[in-house]
Amino acid sequence: MRTIPKRDDTIYKEIESFKDYELTNNTAYEMMIRNNDFIKDHFILVGMCKIKHIKYGEDFTESMIDIFKGFGLDNILKETKNFTNINQDRYQTLIREIPKKWGVDLNTMHNAYDTDSLFLEDTNLLLANEEALMFDYNNSIEINDSTIFRTKFDLSFSRPKIEYDKYSKIITIDLNLSLPLNELIEQIKILKHKEMYGEIKSPLEVLGEELQQADDISKLCTINKNGKEVCFDGRNGITRTQKLADMFFIYDMLRQGKKELRIRTAISEYYEETFNKKTEMSDTTFRKYRDIAIDYIDNMRYKELVTGVKL
């Protein structure tokens, strides 16, 4: 039986602590891992991990076949004249294509729900949970023909990065961090301006496809059942990340069949007990958060946040 979420659970406290520089990616990630299709694909990958001890060419018993079917893996079974075994081509395709579909790597697909290290013998891939650091200082030093040294590092987030190759506008630039902060900010502004006006293109745009720009995380909006646009706002005195944590809590509780009044009461009690702050959530705000969460999670609109492109 699934545990009923509590507003002071670690997951919601972590969402509250998201930093500005990682807010879009991390919010999109939290939406993605709640999507039913993602959960199903994750279940399939975990299924392949669970049956990793079954070797290629080994005769399968009926109970082994039932394990595959239980994980929805019928399509990687191959029947021959006398026995059933793994269709290796299909197996390898799933290992490759499922993470690619979601814009994350295999480790991320596994660690979305399971932090145990697990070795996939058939693919020679190690799944391990790694501690997230603000900066990855496992730097490489690049020396060009003029013997100029450049240090490379990646900015890491507290949630895995989501990247969709065909929509990607990830660029490589040289930044001189010895410059004043205001100059560096202006350089980034110029690049963003060029992207907004189409001078920096995604692979799809290079191929001539016209893409419609989506709203960013500062304007989370949806159309409600009455045909009216509702946006993520309201509730003075609460930070944006606290509001996001409330939104995810609402979604998680609704999925477990909990009623609006119980959810709103739990949220109010959390702020009163944790911050000694009386905060009431109106039914209007509750419906806004609910509708936005359902739209962005169930309809995969979270992709718009990281790609900047309307679905």
Image: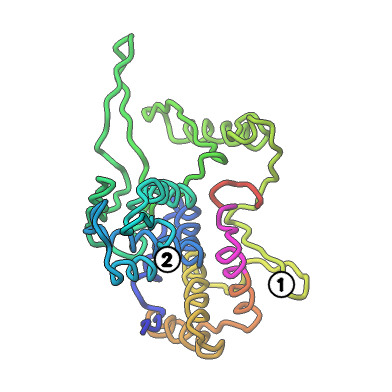
Residue closer to the observer: 18 or 163? 163
For the residue pair 127 and 272, the one nearer the viewer reads as 127
Q: Which residue is pictured at 57% across the width and 56% down the height?
A: 217
Q: Which residue is drawn at 47% across and 67% down?
A: 34
Instruction: Choose mark 1 or mark 2, whichever is in front.
Output: 2
**Residue 130 can be seen, yes or no:** no
Res. 64 mark: none
- Image quadrant in which you'd find residue 191: top right
Taking depth in this image into account, of 214 and 111 the one nearest to the observer is: 111
Could you tell me residue 281's position as x and y percent?
57, 82
The picture places residue 86, in percent across and down from the top left corner, at 33, 54
Circle 1: residue type? Asn
The residue at the far front in this view is: 81
For this view, does 249 lie left or right of residue 120?
Answer: right
Residue type, mark 2 in image: Gly
Q: Quadrant of the N terminus?
A: bottom left
Please name the predominant secondary structure of the magenta segment in the image: helix
Point out residue 100 in the picture as x, y percentages from the top left corner.
45, 47
Q: Is residue 302 magenta?
A: yes
Image mark for residue 224: 1
Among numbered discs 1 and 2, the one appearing first in the sequence: 2
Mark 2 lies on a secondary structure that is loop
Q: Residues within 10 Å of mark 2 (few under 14, many from 20)?
A: some
Q: How many dots with numbers?
A: 2
In percent of the image, x 35 and y 65: which residue is there? 68
Horizontally, residue 17 falls left or right of residue 246, namely left
For the point 61% across and 35% down, the residue is 195
Mark carried by residue 72 = 2
Instruction: Using the image, determine if residue 166 lies above or below residue 134.
Output: above
Numbered range of the magenta stretch? 292-304
